[in-house]
Image (spheres, helix red, strand yellow):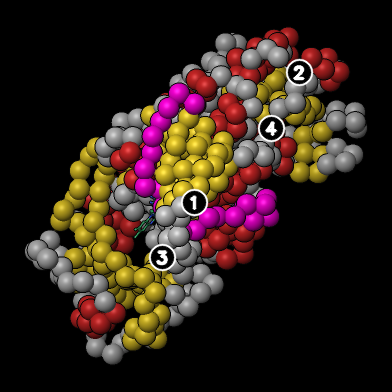
Amino acid sequence: METIFSSVDVLIVGAGPTGLTLACDLARRNIKHRIIDKNTFYNVASRSKAIQPRSLEVVDDLEAIDYILDTGVVDLPVRYYTANDKSIDKPSITVSASSNLETPYRNPVWIAQFDVEKALRDRYALLGGQVELGIEAVKLVQDLNGVTVTVKTLQAEEQIHARYVVGADGGKSNIRKFIQLPLVGETYDDERWYLGDIQLEGLDRDRIHIWTSSEGMLGLTPLPKSNIWQLQATISAEIQNPAEPSLELYQTMLDQQAGTGRVKLTHASWLSIYRINVRMVECYHSHSVFLAGDAAHVHSPAGGQGMNTGIQDAYNLGWKLAAVLQGADTTLLHTYDEERRPIAQAVLEDSSKKIKSITATVTASESLSQSLSTISDDLTSGLPISYRSSSLTRSFTGENAPLLLPGDRAPNADMLQSKEFFGSIFDLLRGTHWTVLAFVNHTDPSVFENLSHDQVRLYCILPSDTERTDQIIDKAGNAYRIYNILNEELLFIRPDGYIALRTSIEESTSILQYLNFIYGSS
Ligand SMILES: Cc1cc2nc3c(=O)[nH]c(=O)nc-3n(C[C@H](O)[C@H](O)[C@H](O)COP(=O)(O)OP(=O)(O)OC[C@H]3O[C@@H](n4cnc5c(N)ncnc54)[C@H](O)[C@@H]3O)c2cc1C
């Protein structure tokens, strides 16, 4: 077999939602990279059914949101059927995030994972990228200059030398095994589920349908803008060796739960058995190899966090890899593990608690509806995630600490207006840059000329009662209120939308010092 040799700055292994998010971010930053996937075709399994508010903000920033909003639905009520053939209608399991989290996307969107992947792939194509299918990473060796990954296709072997490798290759990650980082945790041997993407006749597609009985639960969720339903059914702990999943088996289970002939299953595009693992790595990187998404952490689907945590891992890593490849100190990359691992730890704990309450109630509709009604909350929205204790965060040193502190996510505020602009804080943040939001009243914006830097955009935001028309005015007072601005102040926002520091205008040099800390003083 012929061996080809090549090199690239970043090699992404795995084109699921995590790898695709990173590929979009690197492509828009003009970083030389490749993304490979061992599959010869794109994923057709629905798996995740909901994208959370913080991930919606991420895909908005990556300009991949339109297809997701056009395809998904927000409101998906549930009909629970009881053993005596009665039914109870309940509202959607997902709930809006609290209004004080200030986002354009308070509601999770119900959408199949393959559609989220399509949205990211389409955006990636617009950025000039293309996933390389049918290429499997089979070996990895690190040296002082980077990493050599051996990949195989049906016809050839290639040795790709990369400065950095990102293993976004899912729960069974080979990249994780190559760098010898075990997934530490436990497997819930008794908690197994049958899963499938099914077509059927006999049900309205305007809601989720869930049957419960002493055997457990069976749920059918309509996947928006398709004729596919995701089937999920518990497997009783008493069954030692569950039968292989098949359309016939699922029909039999459904007949037992719903009554023979009530719903007819006609086709399956994905069949699987899922065993719950609650595990994560003890470090997200080894030298120049990074892990992201399911490669770094796996947990129960309760709360709908897996795909979302992966998307947000990639978004945290993307700008850091780009910065280091553009000259920043490599220690910046250590903050990826520092910031993201505690988030995964919290997700593991929360989703384990939630799956326990679900599995304890799967035999009775009323109690199951009760436990499912508590799985969506502010935590699962991802919006309150904060990096306050990160080494990238500069503590607030002024008097009267505001509610919104360095490390917190920069919230949105709308109704900003200037001669050329009408929009929101998120419109100002969208893109690859760092942002200075200068909340000024009397100070002439020209005093901030010293902050000019090719990675930074500065916007002066004036209060609503100002006379000036040459700057952005906070027409409705939303930005001043949401950012707790009492005096003239500067907020320095990271490329991934978190507040790095907030300081008085007299201390504007602290922003320069911060930039020097990241990029060096060039
Ligand atoms: C039933 C179910 C329900 C779920 N519900 C939710 C939910 O509601 N919300 C949520 O956020 N998450 C949910 N998840 C979890 C979600 O599906 C995963 O967390 C998500 O797929 C992880 O994305 P990833 O990109 O990290 O990995 P994956 O999607 O697994 O992608 C990894 C990719 O790497 C490729 N690959 C693997 N090895 C190699 C190799 N050696 N070389 C090249 N390529 C390779 C694979 O082919 C694959 O395409 C659910 C999962 C299941 C099973």
Residue nearest the viewer, comparing 108 with 167? 167
- Residue, x 37% and y 82% (percent of image)? 267
Q: Secondary structure at mark 2?
A: helix
Residue nearest the viewer, comparing 435 with 271? 271
Q: Is mark 3 within 8 Å of ligand 1?
A: yes
**Quarter of the figure that contains the C terminus:** top right
- The residue to which callout 3 is attached is 45
| Cα gap from disc 4 to disc 3, whole angstroms | 35 Å
Check disc 3 and give the amino acid type.
Answer: Ala
Up/down of 234 relative to 402, above or below: below
Check disc 4 and give the amino acid type.
Answer: His
Of the numbered discs in the image, which one, if any, rests on residue 482? none
Q: Are marks 1 and 3 in contact (CB under 8 Å)?
A: no
Mark 3 or 2 closer to N-term?
Answer: 3
- The residue to which callout 2 is attached is 451
Residue nearest the viewer, comparing 22 with 470? 22
The spot of residue 65 in percent (x, y) is 62, 54
Magenta segment boundaries in residue numbering: 123-145
- How many C-alpha atoms fall within 10 Å of the one at disc 1: few (<14), some, or many (≥20)? many
Can residue 393 be seen in this snapshot? yes
Q: Is mark 1 within 8 Å of ligand 1?
A: yes
Question: Which mark is nearer the camera, 1 or 3?
Answer: 1
Quarter holding residue 518: top right
